[in-house]
Amino acid sequence: MYYHFRNCRTTRTGIPCAVTIVLKTAARIISFSLAILACAMTVSSLARGPESVADIAEKLEGVVVNISTATIRARKNPKKLPKIPKGSPFEDLFKDFFNNNGDGISRKKVSSLGSGFVVGASGMIVTNNHVIEEADEIFVTFPDGRKFRVEKVVGRDKKTDIAVLKVSPDKPLKVARFGDSKKIRIGDWVMAIGNPFGLGGTVTVGIISAKNRDINSGPYDNFIQTDAAINKGNSGGPLFNMDGEVIGINTAIISPSGGSIGIGFAVPSLTAQDIIEQLIANGRVRRGWLGVRIQSISKGIAESLGMDNVKGALVSNISPDSPARKAGMKLGDVILKFGGQKIETMRQLPKIVSRSRVNEDIKVEYLRDGQKNTLVVRIEELGEKDKDNDGELEIVLEKPEPDSGKSQRILDMTVSGLTAKLRKRYHIRKNIKGVVVTRVRRKSIAASKHIKKGNVIIEVSQKQVVSPLDIVNEVRKAQLTGRKSVLFLVSDAKGILRFIALPVKVKD
């Protein structure tokens, strides 16, 4: 760094101006260096974690509560109560031991503990459904020692494991604020407050370990994973960000021992808020229903469908009289967009559909026969008997059942016409039409794809088959056109359908 001192004179202090400039420059450099050092120290300290969460924890006092339940479990006591003289000092003791009411039924009170947090000043409390499930009595205890009996279970949702309780406090309660779980990032600091092992209000700190985690607990899995210590009794408690906002509800842990190993899961606030609002307003959750069974798309299936990538959800079954069927959706359609939202993976679709409004018209973009199309579906309400991606859905195919058919060997399988005799042998339902698999070579690709004896091949290359020769012809056609795999629609004996891509050797 160079300075030019032309026409420079001394300053009022008698120090040459050149020297003054040098001193000022040095001071600035030192000041700048100290600032950089301070920033570096701040970043370094933040990397190790927040200095303290005491202020946040103090502000949240009274928001998090302990949940305790009592369940009366009855069982028939095979032993008869001995004859004890009335008024005997042992009369009550024997009654308690053999039965509580003299009716031959022994009753035992079982207690459990959990956590919750306040969402309404008038006494609305949120917790996990599994904490209060089957409970005969529920109590809410506040950090200051106040204890209230739950007057009413306002509503519960088993699919997301959320429940809302109502108590009548003697004064307005301090309410938790919800944050936006979409804004959190992996590595952000979070704080859990709960009632682990019945110890009362306990604060633990950790980071966001992962987002959108699927732990196979249900169709709407979308958990936040954290390494903040979560133990038995923390269930139903809140997960806070560093602004003291609830960004999750602690729900599950993975642990061989029952204690925290740093793998805990929370329902994101984005999901929880909508559920809680519906439970408070209606006592139940209204979910959208499309009426399809879907499966993920493998590379083989994508190639057989002429797709460039493996994105989307493949429709493998459609419920009778469902919104999807009414709108004209067909087996083998690949749903690419739903209501303008891209379907990157199969598991996205159930979550998006469930959040749709009942009676709302939704535009669906799908792939059929290599062409992109759109249709409009009117969403209906998912009832208890409706099972998207779950349960048995039967499809009646309107092709005649062959009386006989010569067996054919193809792709390491032996297939035969579905006769009455074979239907009876494999217990195949009457409404299932197609070609039955009677043999699968061990250690073959077909076997590795879980094709078994008694399975029925309904479609090949999205064309219905009624005889073994239909399958042979479709496979040969694929070989001659240079395709690497063929798409099969296969049913089990009960009518559960799935798509399977089997590789074929190309004919020279």
Image (cartoon, helix red, strand yellow):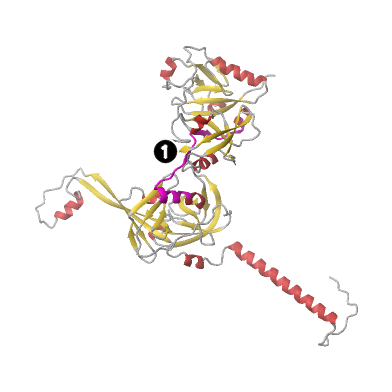
| Mark 1 burial class by Cα count in 10 Å: few <14, some 14-19, many 20+ | few
In the image, residue 220 lies in the stretch drawn in magenta? no
Q: Is residue 159 left or right of residue 184?
A: left
Please state if 171 lies on the left or on the right of 403 as rendered: left
- The percent position of residue 109, horizontal first and vertical second, equals 28, 52
Q: Residue furthest left?
A: 85
In percent of the image, x 88 and y 83: which residue is there?
9
Magenta span contains residue 291:
yes
Q: Which quarter of the rendering shows the N terminus?
A: bottom right
The C terminus lies in which quarter of the figure? top right
The residue sitting at 56% across, 25% down in the picture is 488
Residue receiving disc 1: 383
Question: Depth check: 393 or 471 in front?
Answer: 393
- Whether residue 59 can be seen here: yes
Compared to residue 405, the image places residue 432 above or below, namely below
Quarter of the image for residue 420 reads top left
Residue 272 % position (x, y): 47, 50
**Image: 311 above or below 277:** above
**What segment carries the magenta color?**
274-300
- Residue 409 position in % (x across, y down): 55, 17
Which element type, helix, strand or loop, lies under badge 1?
A: loop
Three-letter amino acid code at the position of disc 1: Gly
Figure quadrant of residue 297: top right
